[in-house]
């Protein structure tokens, strides 16, 4: 994407004001490109220019270049303190001014339209009242169009405002001539109206309705368009609203409230029930459930306790938490999400670059066509009114606005919706690549599995000691162990038994490579690797655990085996469904992992192609081999060992719970930490590109149909103005449908906890 930094380039964002169509975008990009070593992508929907330039080109030079092109430009200022509120107030004030201009224009224009369109209402000297009402519309209401048209003329360029301004001035100028010199000002004059242009006898026909309808409809379209575009950027505003403004910290001075900007890494802050977590941190004291739905898309509240990581923006739904800050400012998870969404919305898809290139020559071509049409009609001996009607209709109807808005509004809505669902894309190229992926290379640990040891099954012999009793004894002994298996057994017992604290242990001994032992409630308890012959029930459970690639441990009480616990890195609850849905989309799943136990996981997920004991270099080589066969490859991973493969793939996808190295090498991040989010990402990409294609088809098709109609005199200028305005509104409205897009309702149904015929594989 243009704007990506290289070793000698830096990236600067510039806000650009005054752009109205894709021709404006093209003009700003060309002006910036005239500076040595500078490339830029300009987004009409966001008003943002992302400029890649050598370090010796000052940002001020970039701003000056944009201003020389006739537009307003400024470097974005990070909102601090009340600056954000002031910006919101400024935007609201601008919206109020535009609304007032539209309302005044409507009050003046509607009587003119009614009188011009309904001959029965045309009283004596009605035309002079219409003239008085039209003059302020032509001068005041259309003033922004005239100013921007003149500014473009000074810079030897033409935009949509040029077309609108010329159309209004031509219509009004003809009407003035007809009123004062052509007999249209005579008392008792009547004028018929038809949606298809017709020429009156003599010079009595007025075009006052065209002179007022063009500003009215264009202002209406711009107003609706601006509201819709604000809707497409709702995701960024909602992300900004998640950030806390103040935070309660606890230190040697006691408890006090400070602005969140003053919070530093290592400080302890409080999160009361109902409050948002101010920044990323780790729980120091307290336990609670936190709602991460607005940050990662995770629908269920997550239980946290001392040592648990917290994400800024999450909502505390339970008890009081004391949290130690681990990241602040731009380093937080929420800030990284905001940056990713902003950068994604600043980029351009290939289709939009084509549309911008067309729009760059479109307005000059329309001006040429309009002049040619006027000359042809006059040269053919047609009535001057008919010639003027065709010329004005061509000027007004041919608007490249829809071309400029077709792609960026869809991308803004899609990337914003994706962020809400926990799918973060790095740019429009990611969505384009995701649509065409036909092979997905999946890592196992942390991607298809949970990434940590968990108890899969417990099997106990019948007798005086039940399964719960044996589990409690085993967990009591494992309390003193730091081994992952021991921690898994303790966590499972606390979650399953929920019967208060575990009993105390004495004579605790840990034997490396074997297990642990001790005395609990008068019993000698040993938990360790299987050693010797086991009763038939436990032997069967052992065979099932080994088949499922889990680690078995035997619990012996008073020297006799009483239970077998299978521990392993379990499949994510949604892994089977996600892989199955990818397969239904025509995407081939490939499992590549350094773990020797990959075949068991592949069998559970019905993945036919498996590459076990794969080194990081081996994964990257596998990706290159698949690409060499013609496959379009995506790689999903979460660790440092996946970074090379992520970078080598056509599309790198990182789990949000993974390492920063993996996320940095990826094009798409599943912030939800949910493998099924990948399926949602594929569906969202396909829906988005379908919307873009529909928008562009409408934008191009609209001009293909309406311009020829205007050229042959079959389109009234007023109808042309309405059609032109509605074309942009329809494009934006179609894009806005992506804001309400929902993933398939399969989540939470079918296959959850599926064992697929294998003991211990969920």
Image (cartoon, helix red, strand yellow):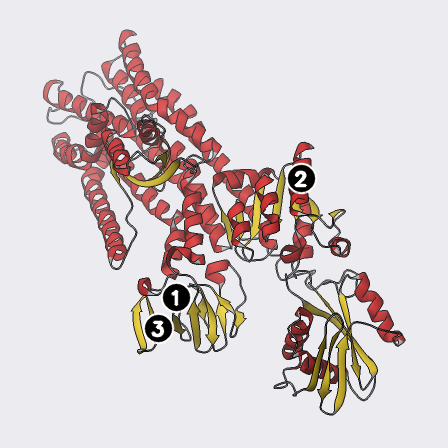
Q: Residues within 10 Å of mark 3 (few under 14, many from 20)?
A: many
Q: Within the image, what quadrant is residue 314 found in?
A: bottom left
Q: Secondary structure at mark 1?
A: loop
Image quadrant containing the C terminus: bottom right
Q: For this view, does 330 lie left or right of residue 500?
A: left
> To which residue does mark 3 refer?
249
**Residue 258 x %, y %:** 30, 69
Q: Within the image, what quadrant is residue 508 found in?
A: bottom right
Callout count:
3
Q: For this view, does 656 lie left or right of residue 440?
A: left
**Residue 398 x %, y %:** 34, 26
Q: Which mark is residue 278?
A: 1
The tag earlier along the polypeptide, 2 or 1, is 1
Towards the viewer: 728 or 680: 680
Identify the residue shown where x is 68% and y is 51%: 579
Q: Secondary structure at mark 2?
A: helix
**Residue 126 x %, y %:** 14, 32
Q: CA distance from mark 2 to mark 1?
A: 43 Å
In this rendering, the label closer to the viewer, 2 or 3 = 2
């Amino acid at each position: 994407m243009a704007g990506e930094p290289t070793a000698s380039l830096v990236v600067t964002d510039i806000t650009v004001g005054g752009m109205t169509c894709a021709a404006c975008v093209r003009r700003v990009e060309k002006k910036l490109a005239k500076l040595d070593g500078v490339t830029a992508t300009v987004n009409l929907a966001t008003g943002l220019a992302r400029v890649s330039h050598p370090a010796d080109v000052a940002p001020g030079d970039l701003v000056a270049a944009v201003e020389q092109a006739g537009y307003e430009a400024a470097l974005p200022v990070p909102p601090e303190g009340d600056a954000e509120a002031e910006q919101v107030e400024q935007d609201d004030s601008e919206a109020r001014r535009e609304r007032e201009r539209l309302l005044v224009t409507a009050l003046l224009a509607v009587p003119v339209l009614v009188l011009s369109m309904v001959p029965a209402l045309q009283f004596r000297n009605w035309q002079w009242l219409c003239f008085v009402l039209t003059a302020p519309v032509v001068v005041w209401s259309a003033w922004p169009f005239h100013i921007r048209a003149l500014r473009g003329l000074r810079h030897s360029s033409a935009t949509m405002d040029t077309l609108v301004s010329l159309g209004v001035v031509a219509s009004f100028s003809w009407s003035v001539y007809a009123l004062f010199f052509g007999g249209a000002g005579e008392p008792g004059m009547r004028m018929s109206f038809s949606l298809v242009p017709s020429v009156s006898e003599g010079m009595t026909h007025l075009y006052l309705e065209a002179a007022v309808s063009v500003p009215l409809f264009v202002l209406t379209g711009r107003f609706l368009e601006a509201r819709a575009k604000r809707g497409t950027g709702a995701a960024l505003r909602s992300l900004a609203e998640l950030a806390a403004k103040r935070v309660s910290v606890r230190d040697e001075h006691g408890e006090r409230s400070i602005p969140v900007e003053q919070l530093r890494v290592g400080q302890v802050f409080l999160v009361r029930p109902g409050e948002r977590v101010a920044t990323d941190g780790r729980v120091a004291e307290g336990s609670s459930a936190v709602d991460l739905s607005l940050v990662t898309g995770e629908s269920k509240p997550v239980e946290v306790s001392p040592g648990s990581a917290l994400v800024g923006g999450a909502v505390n739904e339970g008890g009081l938490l004391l949290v130690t800050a681990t990241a602040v400012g731009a380093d937080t998870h929420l800030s990284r999400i905001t940056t990713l969404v902003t950068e994604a919305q600043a980029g351009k898809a290939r289709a939009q670059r084509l549309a911008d290139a067309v729009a760059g020559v479109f307005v000059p071509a329309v001006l040429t066509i309009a002049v040619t049409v006027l000359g042809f009609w006059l040269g053919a001996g047609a009535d001057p009114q008919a010639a003027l009607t065709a010329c004005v209709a061509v000027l007004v109807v041919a608007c490249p606005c829809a071309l400029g808005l077709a792609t960026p509004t869809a991308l803004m809505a899609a990337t914003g919706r994706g962020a809400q669902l926990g799918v973060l894309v790095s740019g429009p190229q990611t969505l384009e690549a995701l649509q065409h992926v036909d092979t997905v290379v999946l890592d196992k640990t942390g991607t298809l599995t949970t990434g940590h040891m968990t108890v899969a099954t417990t099997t106990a012999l019948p007798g005086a000691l039940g399964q719960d009793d044996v589990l409690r004894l085993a967990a009591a002994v494992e309390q003193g162990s730091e081994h992952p298996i021991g921690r898994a057994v303790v966590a499972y017992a606390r979650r399953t038994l929920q019967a208060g604290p575990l009993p105390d242990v004495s004579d605790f001994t840990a034997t490396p490579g074997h297990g642990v032992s001790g005395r609990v409630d008068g019993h000698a308890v040993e938990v360790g690797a299987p050693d010797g012959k086991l009763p038939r029930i436990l032997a069967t459970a052992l065979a099932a655990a080994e088949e499922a690639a889990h680690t078995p441990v035997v619990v012996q009480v008073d020297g006799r085996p009483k239970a077998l616990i299978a521990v392993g890195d379990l499949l994510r609850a949604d892994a089977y469904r996600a892989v199955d849905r990818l397969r239904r989309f025509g995407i081939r799943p490939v499992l590549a992992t350094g773990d020797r136990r990959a075949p068991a996981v592949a069998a559970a997920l019905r993945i036919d192609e498996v590459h076990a004991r794969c080194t990081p270099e081996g994964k990257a080589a596998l990706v290159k081999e698949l690409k060499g066969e013609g496959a379009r490859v995506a790689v999903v991973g979460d660790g440092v060992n996946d970074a090379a493969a992520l970078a080598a793939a056509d599309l790198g996808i990182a789990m949000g719970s993974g390492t920063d190295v993996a996320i940095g090498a990826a094009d798409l991040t599943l912030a939800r930490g949910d493998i099924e989010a990948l399926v949602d990402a594929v569906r969202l990409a396909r829906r988005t590109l379908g919307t873009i294609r529909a928008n562009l088809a409408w934008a191009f098709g609209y001009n293909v149909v309406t311009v020829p109609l205007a050229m042959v005199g079959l389109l009234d200028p007023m109808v042309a103005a309405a059609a032109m305005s509605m074309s942009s509104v329809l494009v934006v409205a179609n894009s806005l449908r992506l804001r309400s897009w929902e993933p398939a309702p399969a989540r939470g149904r079918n296959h959850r906890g599926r064992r697929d015929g294998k003991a211990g594989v969920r």
